Amino acid sequence: MKASKMQRLWRFAGSAWVLLVVAACGQTSGGDGACGQVEPCGGDLVGSFRVTNSCVTKTAGDAQLENLLRTASGCATATVETVDAKSSGSLTFNADSTYSANLTQTAKGAAMVPTSCLNRQGFTLTCGLLNQALAALTLPGVSSIKCGDVSGGCSCSFVASPDAINETGTYSLSGTTVSFSGSVPRADYCVAGGSLHLISLDTSTPPAIIADLVASKQ
């Protein structure tokens, strides 16, 4: 019982890295605005760009992480306290539809597991037991997780393993969407005012920005 409960509670961590870059930001139309404030506008991709920013804000990203955490733990009141991701590197787009990418991303965050999640069926899962369980688990994409006692439950901080892409390949355009032959995810984009935004949108109507990688033309 103990092992399965702990594994359910922390199953979210293996997938958390995928969601850590999620951003929920207001939108404006086109241009070289701040991270998360630019809608897809297309533009001329040819050139070299250096990554200067990536968005993480405390709304939609937290909501998706919380849904994952709540599903895994079975606790409707588990919350994400903070989430932060940082990106660096460069992208080069050539006129012959080839590209090169050298990108690195790191991320960290914190979640709150309230006492109501820890007391079930006569068993109390302490923060110390959580740490013991984590020491025995391999969580893909997560380099460390540590929980500590706080008023009302356990505060758990997690650090994602650095994620790197270093590749060359070909790219194709369709409207304001750019697709890559390699590991770089397909994205909507906007090039204006010397800045490139690679933008991920959700499926809502109208679509909302959930991630934005910003790079400056060199």
Image: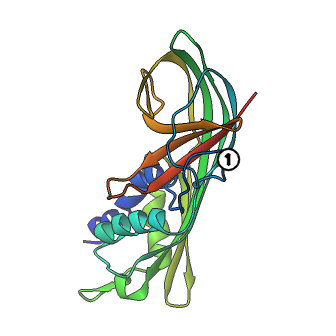
Q: Locate residue 138, reporting x and y percent.
A: 42, 49
The quadrant of the image that shows the C terminus is top right
- Check disc 1: other Cα within 10 Å, few if <14, some if 14-19, many if 20+: some
The correct choice, above or below, for 171 with respect to 104 in the image is above
Q: Which residue is mark 1?
A: 53
Tell me the quadrant of the picture where the N terminus can be found: bottom left
Residue in front for this viewpoint, 140 or 1: 140
* Residue 132 located left or right of residue 214: left
Q: Is residue 157 left or right of residue 78?
A: right
The single residue placed furthest to the front in the displayed view is 29
Q: Up-down: is 88 above or below 56? A: above
The residue depicted at 50 percent of the width and 75 percent of the height is: 128
Please name the residue shown 49% across and 55% down the image. 22
The answer to whether residue 128 is left or right of residue 195 is left
Q: Which image quarter: residue 197?
A: top right
Instruction: Say whether residue 139 is visible.
Output: no
Residue plotted at (59% across, 58% down):
108
